[in-house]
Image (tube, helix red, strand yellow):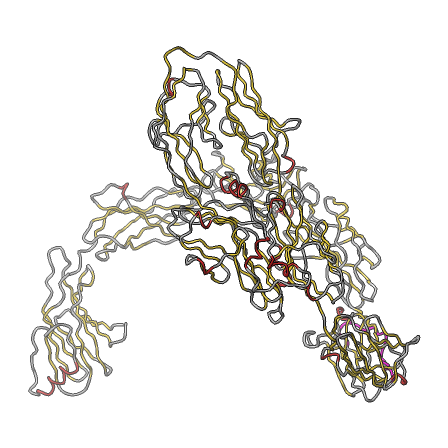
Amino acid sequence: MMWSSWRLILFLSLTGCLSEYSAAVPGLPTSYAAILRIKSASSSSALFNSKNRPRLSSPSLGSISSPGWRGTAQHYHSPTNLNHFSEAFKHDESVDYGPVFIQEPDDVIFPTDSEEKKVSLNCQARGNPAPIYRWLRNGTEIDIESDYRYSLIEGSFIINNPNEAKDSGQYQCLTTNVFGSILSREATLQFAYLGNFSGRTRSAVSVREGQGVVLMCSPPLHSPEIVYSWVFNEFPSFVAEDSRRFISQETGNLYISKVQTSDVGSYICLVKNTVTNARVLSPPTPLTLRNDGVMGEYEPKIEVHFPYTVTAAKGTTVKMECFALGNPVPTISWRKVNDHNPSKARLRKSQAVLEIPNVQLEDAGMYECKAENSRGRNVFRGQLQVYTYPHWVEKLNNTQLDSGEQLRWECKATGKPRPTYHWLKNGVPLWVQSRVEMVNGVLMIHSVNLSDAGMYQCLAENKYGTIYASAELKILASAPTFALNQMKKTLIITRGQEVVIECKPQASPKPTITWKKGDKAVRGNKRITVLPDGSLQILNASKSDEGRYLCQGENVFGSAETVASVFVKEPTRIDLTPKRTELTVGESIVLSCKAIHDNTLDVTFYWTLNGQPIDFEKEGGHFESIRAQASSADLMIRNILLMHAGRYGCRIQTTADSVSDEAELLVRGPPGPPGIVIVEEITETTATLSWSPGADNHSPISTYNLQARSPFSLGWQTVKTVPENISGDMESAVAVELNPWVEYEFRVVAINKIGTGDPSAPSRVIRTSEAVPKTAPANVSGRSGRRHELVIAWEPVSEEFQNGEGFGYIVAFRPNGTRGWKEKMVTSSDASKFIYRDESVPPLTPFEVKVGVYNNKGDGPFSPIAVICSAEGEPSAAPTDVKATGLSVSEILVAWKHIKENLGRPQGFEVGYWKDMEQEEAAEKVKTEGNESSIILTGLEGNTLYRLTVRAYNAAGYGPPSSTVRAATKKSPPSQAPTNIMWMQDGSHVSLGWEPVRPLANESDVMGYKVLFRQEGHSNSQVIETQKTSAVVLLPDVGVYIIEVCAVSEGGDGTASSQIRVPSFSGGKVTSSQSTLHALSTSSSSVTLLLALMVPSTSW
């Protein structure tokens, strides 16, 4: 709203409020609000029914929030009120201050069909004392008590069951405390609804084929914006927009530039409310074709276009429509007159819509839409104007002035159109008066008094919005008072010092200051001056300046005084020794600091190093402060380090003065690291290096040590150099005897008479140049191989000595006693052997061999000649006298003999065996090594006949097999365990008896029995063998014994009987059976004792 449109109604009751001597406070008559802005009825109506009503936005808050879901009131944020950030907001709560907004009301769009029948306009402010709240609608204060639907909760205005007729309008929050009032920005309450289309039947539209047509939507009443679409024949078959068909979101109409037969049908306009998402359908509009012929071609006619003047807020998206009827279908094009189209501009809906996102001031201008076909063209032009909302560039600050001073406040804002400024005091317009001036955002009030105190607001507005800035003006009017820290001061100074005795009473207006010393007024001279702030300055103080000084401040409201006592002492002097000292790392020293001072003053000592206080607890025990006397202090520095060199300061502090002195401490130590090493030249075996010297740490550098590191070295190693000894005044040297084609890093270490310093940073990694290899392979020898092979092996040359890329080996060999060499190339640098095969070479033929090296630079040396033999042949004779004997159910012993040979010496023998009923190809094989002449085959099947052969083998291969022999494994041992075991104990002797085991037909015959016994808890058993079915066992120790019996056969041991647990003790006879217990003794106690001691292995 523009101020020019306001109606200002002055009520008699407001006359006092507008007076320069009045201040707005709670309790003003309600009618005072009538002087605020009241929009004319016509303007207000246009505001609520306008589709494009401007919304205030702010860069700090972002763009307008998009509508939410159906049934919820929508809040729209206006520009931030800079008053929110007033310094008053930061005040301590113990300080009184005027109201400051924390939250101001936002625009609200309330859906009429909302399930939540309530609107909340939020307002919150801070202040001390706490502010109270009132609300205005359309400039008139709302009587909360007048309508049961209204309520006020902590400043927020709540409307239950909102009514559009009663409640639509502009709302403002007015908050007040004793310091004044401030008025919030305006918030619009708008109701969202969508009416129904008229139910009247729509007439059919009849056109010729090829003719253009416009189908009218005629939307129902609605608020706010709606979105249009069209349904063809039946829902949800929507009309698709293209170069021939266009739906305007401005008019809602459907435009068809050239009707085709496929367009005939029924059309329904569908509108959707953007806030409530409600949708309604219009009655159908039939489209038919006339039968009086086809429409001929005609030039375009622009039927819908953007306004002649389009206004848009900076940062929003502009959409301009342009569509034409015509035959043939017109083509739409756009241009910015006398300029290029914005690069961000986009064409939508077959170029019928020009869209410019994030529009800026430079996008403003004349835009042209052109519709063109083969029959002609048509053009429309319109102006795009871009405006900006007001935005603060300079805001107000809270101010306090003495009574009678001048106030000057200036607020500045940017905007397009340029904003105008208005001022409010306590929520009421401020007018120009004799003392009050307002020009272009500047407010001046001359000779302020208490009536000018209050809350002020500056309003900057243009036709698109208004922003508020607030500040508080406090007028000071008080008699002089002194703070407690200025009362009855005692100042102790030293002779010759300057002293300033403060006298700064709080008063308004500024008081007159007078000084007295004792009973006499202080008169100014060259040494004594009263400063502009009222303080008394005394230069070059002497004993005569001692005394009691009184300062009095006085203004029209009263007076106050303060007293200060001044004492002048002799200045303190300092003696710090020694002043300059040189030490070596590891030594210790004591610095002594003495004070010559007035005996009435206490003395404190402080030590610093290079201007920084020494932390005695964090210095690793190197520093210790020793206070032997009241007037002296010593600093002990133990085991001194290089880092401890510098300026040591001693500061003496008394209540009157402070003096300090410094001593310099030089620390000699090993040199610091030299500067980074630079590789200036590199060859195959040398590197020219340079460096810059490091700190000598007060002891000249005597020599440098040059070190190198490569992937093949164990850390850093000292390298040979030219010159051999690098003196301390040199800054370059040549590293020699390096290996070619190796990556090196170099560093330098400086040495002086104190010691060896830290090394320099490493140089960059550098590779020496390639060279012919100089290292031949070592340990050339022969290896075993197959018949007719010569296997030559060697130790590979390390990569460190390969001297370049393309490294390989040259293998040379010749039969012993011949002259010509055969040479073979081995290209792998990792190779360690070469195999030469020649069918004509007999086994164990001696050869002379040597192995050389080469790389891309050429051939290197050969190794010394070694004599090796070709591979021996495979064994030629078969083993003889092969015998096989079955040992058990799973074992066969195989034995053989072998004739010694000169060639083809065996490394071992291979035994092949297979079942008699199988083929030899199924044979399993087992090998022996060395000169073994027998082997026991295990894991065989029992009672099975096997065939066996034996053959020798070596590295050259296998010899012929022996003749086949046969052997069978034994039958399986008896599976039946001994039964009916009877036992009788006599002391440590146990007599056992059992029934004989009878083997099955496929089991081995019983050759005897084994009795196994062991003490419980032990794993090793003792064995008694017998061919009878009885045995006597001696139990040597006291305890429980476990006894088992099994049959013995040539197939092995049979199944063991169940375990018997027998105790070993003296006296009596005990008998037992697994099936029956027989008492062989008349002593029933013995039986009882046996039952008590024995746990039988089977159930009784």
Q: Is residue 208 above or below residue 63?
A: above
Task: Tally the numbered discs.
Answer: 0
- Left or right of 612, for residue 948: left
The N terminus: image quadrant: top right
The image position of residue 809, as x and y in percent, is: 60, 40
Instruction: Write the residue at 36% across / 52% down.
Output: 928
- Per the rendered image, the range of residues in magenta is 569-587
The image position of residue 1006, as x and y in percent, is: 14, 63
The image position of residue 597, as x and y in percent, is: 84, 85
Q: Quadrant of residue 1026?
A: bottom left
The C terminus: image quadrant: bottom left
- Residue 45 visible in rendering: yes
Task: Return the residue nearer the eye: 274 or 863.
Answer: 274
Task: Return the residue nearer the eye: 275 or 404.
Answer: 404
- Left or right of 698, for residue 439: left
Reply yes or no: does residue 586 show up in magenta.
yes
Q: Is residue 346 above or below residue 940?
A: above
Task: Return the residue nearer the eye: 956 or 900.
Answer: 956
Reply yes or no: does residue 147 show up in magenta.
no
Instruction: Write the residue at 76% across / 56% down.
Output: 675
